[in-house]
Amino acid sequence: QVQLVESGGGLVQPGGSLRLSCAASGSIFSIYALGWYRQAPGKQRELVATATPGDSTNYADSVKGRFTISRDNGKNTVYLQMNSLKPEDTAVYYCNAVLKLSRTALYEAYWGHGTQVTVSS
């Protein structure tokens, strides 16, 4: 059983900052990618940022220069530092992990339950 537990969401004023955390736990053999997605009301879930081996990162154009993703491989944890937040960043943020449970297993995607981020004055 794999669990992804997010924390750090909340209400913040425009221009403010938040830091999201997501810890993966369970019988994990190897994690390939960790990332964050978000879903605003009435919209599809979209990629925010991902981090893959070799410190490779990828960001949505809308958050480049404002958000920073980082991972702690020893703790199976991924972080999302969000600065200069805008009202359009309001969404439920979901943690995603692409991992496998054994040496011979295939990599599969797992999701957290989400954490609400609201940017409003």
Image (cartoon, rainbow, N blue to C red):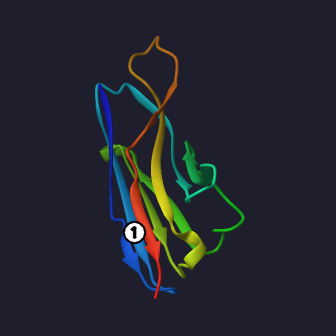
Residue drawn where x is 52% and y is 48% of the image: 35
Residue 80 image offset from top left, x and y in percent: 46, 62
Q: Is residue 44 toward the left or the right of residue 35 in the image?
A: right
Residue 14 image offset from top left, x and y in percent: 51, 86
In terms of depth relative to the viewer, which is nearer, 113 or 33?
A: 113
Q: How many marks?
A: 1
Residue drawn where x is 37% and y is 45% of the image: 113
Residue position marked by numbered label 1 in the rendering: 19
Residue 103 image offset from top left, x and y in percent: 43, 15
User: In the rendered image, which quarter is residue 61 located in?
Assistant: bottom right
* Secondary structure of the residue carrying numbered label 1: strand
Residue drawn where x is 55% and y is 42% of the image: 53
User: In the rendered image, which quarter is residue 3 located in?
Assistant: top left
Quarter of the figure that contains the N terminus? top left
Residue 48 image offset from top left, x and y in percent: 59, 57
Q: Is residue 101 toward the left or the right of residue 43 in the image?
A: left
The image shows residue 95, relative to residue 98, as above or below, that is below
The image shows residue 54, relative to residue 102, as above or below, that is below
